[in-house]
């Protein structure tokens, strides 16, 4: 099988996000593999080990993303591809990323493309479906189980607290949800092997694209953190008095009654 994984470099979920003048201050931030993409990496390795073939991890970003690609290689990916847009794309969006990936895959013959359900930084969940539509292949989002038999795939799809059973055919793009598997940690031997595994770096010129082809369709007007929650208030006294005070607060202060 010819398997690909789409990977994104995101903020560490333990990081404190600082916003200044409508932009995220990222100079000192720690970055990781988008957690949902780790499920895609693990599933790709499992499917390769079961069915044979090769797994390639692909990211669109700047040269700093090489660290996350090397981590994926240490987890068990065979090859990595970095499409470096640092010098060519000033401000991209989901359209930009999907267009670049679509062009990259035009001369490939993927049987299976796996991606995270969402990225934890923007959480749009658009890149995978946009790419599948552009390539004209089947896609299923938020999968929690995947079994492949020949050119058929049986899938469990998470649907808000329930499971939808889907049968479809390859080639297929699927986005991975929590519960699909338990991503492995890179082992020491894996880390050592990752240093020798191939990592190809491309630019959009290599894909015969120019800046106009990948110009963003959306514009970010402002970025801001949600307001801090005010401290709660504990009502005291007899129950009847607490109820009366609560009703008064909801009517006069919160104005929700």
Image (cartoon, helix red, strand yellow):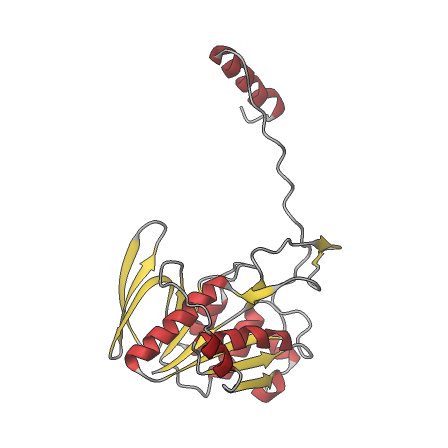
Is residue 209 shown to the viewer in this render? no
Specify whether 179 is left or right of 223.
left
Q: Residue extending furthest left?
A: 149
Look at the image and tell me whether residue 229 can be seen. Answer: yes
Residue projecting furthest to the right: 21
- Count of marks overlaid on the render: 0
Residue 247 placement (x, y as % from top left):
53, 18
Residue shown at 55%/19% (left/top)? 235
Compare residues 73 and 24 and report the one nearer the observer.
73
Q: Position of residue 256 (x, y in %)?
A: 55, 27
Residue at the spot 63% in from the left edge and 78% down from the top edge: 63
Q: Residue at x 47, y 67 (%)?
A: 37
Q: Residue at x 34, y 73 (%)?
A: 46
Q: Where does the N terminus fall, quadrant-wise?
A: bottom left
Place residue 54 in its image quadrant: bottom left
Q: Quadrant of residue 203?
A: bottom right
Find residue 60 and report its image quarter.
bottom right
Q: Residue 83's spot in the image, x, y percent?
A: 57, 80
* 9 with respect to 90 (left or right): left
- 75 or 47, which lies in front? 75
């Amino acid at each position: 099988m010819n398997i690909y994984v789409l990977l994104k470099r995101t903020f560490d979920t333990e990081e404190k996000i600082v916003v200044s003048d409508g932009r995220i201050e990222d100079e000192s931030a720690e970055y990781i593999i988008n957690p949902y993409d780790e499920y895609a990496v693990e599933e790709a390795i499992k499917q390769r080990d079961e069915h044979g073939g090769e797994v390639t991890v692909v990211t669109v970003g700047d040269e700093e993303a090489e660290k996350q690609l090397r981590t994926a290689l240490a987890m068990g990916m065979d090859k990595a591809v970095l499409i470096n847009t640092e010098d060519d794309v000033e401000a991209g969006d989901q359209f930009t990323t999907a267009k670049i990936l679509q062009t990259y895959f035009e001369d490939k013959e993927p049987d299976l493309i796996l991606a995270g359900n969402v990225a934890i930084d923007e959480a749009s969940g658009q890149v995978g479906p946009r790419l599948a539509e552009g390539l004209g292949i089947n896609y299923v989002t938020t999968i929690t189980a995947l079994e492949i038999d020949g050119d058929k795939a049986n899938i469990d799809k998470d649907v808000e607290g329930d499971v939808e059973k889907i049968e479809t055919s390859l080639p297929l793009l699927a986005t991975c949800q929590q519960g699909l598997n338990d991503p492995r940690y890179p082992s020491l031997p894996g880390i050592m092997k990752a240093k020798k595994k191939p990592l190809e770096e491309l630019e959009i010129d290599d894909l015969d694209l120019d800046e106009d082809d990948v110009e963003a369709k959306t514009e970010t007007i402002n970025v801001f953190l949600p307001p801090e929650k005010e401290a709660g208030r504990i009502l005291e006294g007899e129950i009847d008095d607490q109820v009366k005070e609560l009703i008064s607060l909801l009517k006069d202060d919160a104005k929700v009654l």
